[in-house]
Image: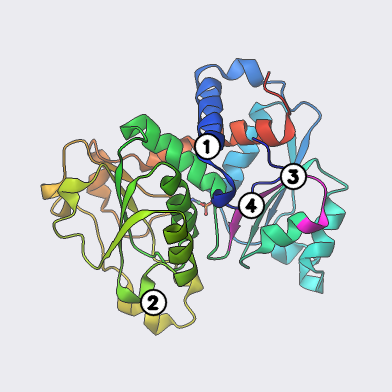
């Protein structure tokens, strides 16, 4: 990978993605080969929004590469509460660490941070913008389950605020996937995302219902309605719970349909689906470790061992 930072999925072409996924697969098959790759390296975890998977899997990945982390902790316990700017915060932290993983509620925050530091910045989610390392583990999971060629993917839920969707759609376009976006009208893909996808030649269709679509799909990517991003709780209540995947929904699905979800889920997928062969979302979350090991190795470790 020829980039200093990972800020958006759009900066990765197909060769970049395949190289990282291949590296992740080699690491998953034989983690011993990379266990000293980041010895003496420190990664700063700066999470201005809650996280379980992204934060812990970046920490696990760093430690499994022989490195260590420093953690800014919660915003409430940091000097952000005293009014310190993001630019000042990351300029200080670059003196403590060799790379920064940043999650922030503002779209564009990771790009802004990268403009102020010389260590690699990895965007771990910027508001309703992008979540590119999630996309890498999503693609890794899809490749294992269904391959990335000639893929038909349904993406359902909150397409407006869902940053994992925005990143994933850009990356799937690199693989010429057929994409079906399913959402209420108020939660369709933002115009700017639609514009970029059309410019990139994406093959996409938009729907309000999953009816009739399931038999076509190789992968169903389910997302949570991002309650925390709604300006108005009433607007959230109008759309909450509209798409729930359960055994009845899946009656028309192909036997080999792969169901994914970036997690956390609320009620989008019934727990009974967890016991079916379709359910891939926990494996998807686990894939975050080898994929982020590959990413950190590429960003901080230099040439491959
Ligand atoms: N998928 C994901 O970003 O999960 P977290 O919010 O727990 O990091």
Mark 1 element type: helix
Secondary-structure class at tag 2: helix
Label 1, residues with CA under 10 Å away: few <14, some 14-19, many ≥20: many
Q: Quadrant of residue 36?
A: top right
Whether disc 3's CB lies below 8 Å from ligand 1 is answered no
Residue extent of the magenta highlight = 115-126
Instruction: Give the CA distance from mark 2 to mark 4.
Output: 28 Å
Rate crowding at label 2 as few (under 14), some (14 to 19) or many (20 or more) other CA atoms within 10 Å: some
As drawn, the label of residue 17 is 1
191 with respect to 103 (left or right): left
In the picture shown, does residue 37 fall above or below 52?
A: above
Residue linked to disc 2: 236
Quadrant in the picture for residue 92:
bottom right
58 relative position to 168: left or right:
right
Question: Which type of secondary structure does the marked residue at label 4 adopt?
Answer: loop
The label number, if any, that marks residue 7 in the structure image: 4
Mark earlier in primary sequence (2, 3): 3
Alpha-carbon distance for marks 2 and 1?
Answer: 35 Å
119 in the magenta segment: yes
> Is ligand 1 closer than 8 angstroms to the Cβ of mark 4?
no
Kindly identify which residue carries mark 3: 120
Mark 1 or mark 4, earlier in chain: 4
Residue drawn at (46%, 54%), measured in percent from left and top?
200
Picture quarter with the N terminus:
top right
């Amino acid at each position: 990978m020829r980039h200093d930072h990972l800020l958006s999925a759009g900066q990765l072409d197909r060769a970049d993605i395949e190289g990282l996924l291949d590296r992740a697969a080699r690491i998953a098959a034989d983690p011993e080969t990379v266990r000293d790759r980041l010895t003496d390296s420190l990664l700063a975890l700066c999470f201005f929004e809650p996280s379980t998977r992204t934060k812990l899997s970046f920490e696990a990945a760093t430690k499994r590469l022989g490195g260590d982390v420093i953690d800014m902790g919660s915003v409430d316990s940091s000097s952000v509460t005293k009014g310190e700017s993001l630019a000042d915060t990351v300029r200080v932290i670059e003196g403590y660490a060799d790379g920064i993983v940043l999650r922030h509620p503002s779209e564009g925050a990771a790009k802004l941070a990268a403009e102020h530091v010389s260590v690699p910045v990895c965007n771990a989610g910027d508001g309703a913008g992008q979540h590119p390392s999630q996309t890498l583990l999503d693609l890794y999971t899809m490749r294992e389950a269904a391959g990335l060629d000639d893929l038909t993917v349904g993406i359902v839920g909150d397409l407006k605020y869902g940053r994992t969707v925005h990143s994933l759609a850009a990356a799937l376009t690199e693989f010429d996937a057929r994409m079906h976006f399913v959402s209420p009208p108020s939660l369709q893909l933002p115009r700017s995302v639609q514009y970029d996808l059309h410019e990139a030649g994406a093959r996409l269709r938009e729907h309000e219902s999953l009816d009739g679509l399931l038999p076509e799909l190789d992968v169903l990517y389910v997302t949570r309605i991002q309650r925390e991003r709604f300006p108005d709780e009433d607007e959230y209540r109008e759309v909450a719970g509209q798409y729930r995947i359960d055994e009845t929904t899946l009656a028309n699905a192909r036997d080999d349909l792969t169901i994914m979800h970036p997690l956390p889920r609320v009620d989008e997928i019934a727990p009974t689906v967890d016991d079916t062969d379709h359910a891939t979302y926990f494996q998807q979350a686990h894939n975050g470790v080898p994929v982020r090991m590959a990413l950190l190795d590429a960003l901080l470790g230099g040439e491959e061992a």
